[in-house]
């Protein structure tokens, strides 16, 4: 029952959000701030995680595929495709669901409990549209850049395995990352991540917008935003993979 | 003028407002008073349209709010200013930006005109110029209330709502805020509705007082009459403090 009611409330909220802003001037004033806050400020965490995951993924693949029958490029190929297909889109979005999702839910939730949203409504402003639309659009547009950035750093991280350890040569790795490359995987990954960005930002905004009570309740909204956003990402990952790769 | 006629409002079977009728006059400080939990906040939120009422009429100069579509309610709300209990200033903006916000959202004035109007409003509420570029968190509670009043009057509203304007303020600052609301009401001929349980405010600026008891409109009058009413609930509310007991004794 709660799932149905939450879904209904979410759809009604999105109906208010996804309309033309009352004033484009105000939208474009808010939009760059959101690009910076949700996108640019996520770069450090994306960079750190991507480099280390690329590094460890290459190491693990090499150490666990020591069969001489496997070609030398196996490690590079596996690392590249894992990063392209899942890590830099799905896993990265699960991480960002924590960072960006909690940020959005707590910001909007605090505005709700301190009556700032009521103040906007009393002024005659469509508060849902004014507060949520710039966040959704900014995050959806920033996500492809974050994904490409993550792919590049992840593959780059793997390259350092060859330099910093003696378990494989950089030459083998470079052959692997170029072997049988399918550009469609990048397209698939970008489309998928944009859908996930919409899920993260809109679900977090929903939980924040309908917060009530005090600081403790904003914390609960934030947790719900991260947990439910992550579950939806996993669910839609299966759906979109079936649609785009089958 | 705002007229409330036979308004009922329930939450999950809990009947909060019971057939409430009242008239809030233009150019006067109309006060809704009552004990905590009496339904005065629900009444105010119903009048503004934050709660949808179950039954009755809420007429803004003849325009019935419950009959309006959301689009029309938004247009009506541009004629409304509101002072919230916690001020509800946007904490990511400066004091000046807070006051400019409604102007930027709804007026077609140039940037310079908007800044000028915002500065005029802030000066009107006696806020020092050095505070204009500070964040709301960097100014005192009393100053925040002044900024909230300045923001509420920026678009020259016809209706001003104040929810517990003195909450969290010391008696002297409360008096200043009360007087400010009173002055603005008369100067701009606004229909002001103040939700309060502060008897000092009532005696200071209450020109039309509506007493709500257990969800019902129990009395309507002015501050001159309030000491001489034969209403047990109202007397219990008015003479709850030692100060007003002494005033009553002195009057007798």
Image (tube, coloured by chain):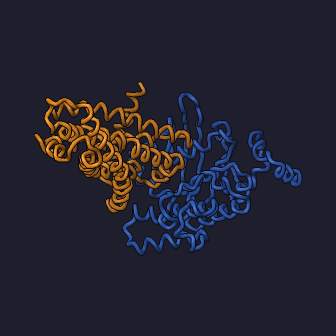
Chain colours: A orange, B blue
Quadrant assignment for the N terminus of chain B:
bottom right
Q: Quadrant of residue B103?
A: bottom left
Q: Residue furthest top?
A: A1
Q: Nearer the viewer, residue B210 or A45?
A: A45
Is B170 displayed left or right of A217 in the figure? right
Residue located at (75% from left, 52% from top): B225
**Residue A47 left/right relative to A162:** right
Residue A195 seen from this side: no
Q: Quadrant of residue B188?
A: bottom right
x%, y% of residue A127?
41, 50
Residue B250, percent across and down? 89, 54
Left or right: A74 as drawn, with respect to A36? left
Q: Position of residue A161 (x, y in %)?
A: 27, 45
Q: Nearer the viewer, residue B218 or A215?
A: A215
Q: Residue furthest left?
A: A180
Q: Is residue A227 visible?
A: yes
**Residue drawn at (16%, 35%) of the image:** A244
Q: Position of residue A222 (x, y in %)?
A: 46, 40
In the displayed structure, does residue A60 sit left or right of residue A110?
Answer: left
Instruction: State which quadrant residue B13 falls in.
Output: top right
A205 or B7: which is nearer to us? Answer: A205
């Amino acid at each position: 029952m709660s799932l149905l009611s939450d879904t209904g409330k979410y759809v009604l909220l999105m109906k208010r959000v996804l309309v033309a802003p009352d004033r484009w001037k105000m939208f474009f004033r808010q939009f760059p701030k959101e690009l910076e806050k949700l996108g640019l400020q996520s770069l450090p965490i994306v960079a750190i995680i991507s480099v280390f995951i690329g590094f460890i993924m290459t190491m693990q693949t090499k150490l666990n595929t020591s069969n001489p029958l496997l070609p030398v490029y196996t490690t590079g190929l596996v690392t590249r495709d894992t990063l392209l297909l899942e890590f830099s889109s799905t896993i990265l979005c699960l991480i960002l669901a924590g960072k960006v999702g909690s940020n959005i839910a707590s910001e909007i939730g605090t505005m709700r409990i301190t009556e700032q949203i009521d103040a906007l409504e009393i002024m005659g402003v469509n508060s849902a549209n004014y507060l949520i639309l710039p966040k959704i659009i900014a995050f959806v547009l920033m996500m492809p850049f974050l994904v490409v950035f993550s792919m590049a750093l992840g593959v780059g991280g793997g390259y350092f395995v060859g330099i910093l350890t003696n378990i494989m040569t950089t030459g083998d790795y470079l052959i692997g990352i170029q072997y049988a490359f399918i550009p469609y995987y990048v397209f698939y990954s970008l489309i998928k991540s944009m859908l996930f960005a919409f899920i993260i930002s809109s679900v977090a905004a929903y939980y924040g917008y309908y917060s009530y009570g005090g600081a403790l309740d904003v914390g609960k909204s934030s947790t719900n935003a991260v947990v439910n956003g992550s579950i939806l990402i996993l669910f839609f990952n299966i759906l979109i993979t079936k649609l785009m790769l089958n | 003028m705002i007229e409330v006629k036979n308004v009922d409002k329930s939450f999950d079977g809990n009947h909060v407002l019971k057939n409430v009728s009242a008239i809030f006059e233009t150019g006067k400080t109309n006060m809704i008073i009552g004990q905590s939990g009496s339904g005065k906040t629900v009444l105010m939120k119903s009048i503004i349209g934050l709660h949808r009422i179950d039954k009755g009429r809420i007429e803004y100069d003849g325009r019935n709010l419950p009959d309006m579509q959301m689009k029309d309610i938004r247009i009506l709300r541009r004629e409304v200013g509101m002072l919230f209990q916690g001020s509800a200033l946007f904490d990511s903006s400066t004091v000046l930006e807070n006051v400019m916000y409604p102007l930027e959202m709804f007026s077609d004035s140039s940037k310079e005109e908007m800044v000028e109007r915002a500065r005029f409003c802030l000066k009107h509420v006696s806020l020092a110029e050095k505070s204009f570029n500070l964040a709301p968190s960097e100014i005192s509670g009393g100053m925040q209330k002044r900024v909230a009043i300045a923001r509420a009057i920026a678009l020259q509203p016809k209706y001003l709502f104040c929810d517990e304007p003195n909450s969290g303020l010391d008696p002297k600052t409360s008096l200043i805020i009360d007087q400010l609301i009173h002055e603005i009401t008369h100067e701009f001929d606004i229909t002001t509705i103040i939700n309060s349980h502060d008897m000092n405010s009532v005696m200071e600026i209450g020109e039309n007082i509506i007493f709500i008891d257990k969800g019902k409109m129990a009395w309507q009058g002015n501050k001159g009459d309030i000491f001489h009413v034969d209403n047990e609930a109202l007397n219990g509310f008015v003479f709850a403090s030692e100060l007003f007991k002494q005033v009553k004794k002195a009057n007798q």
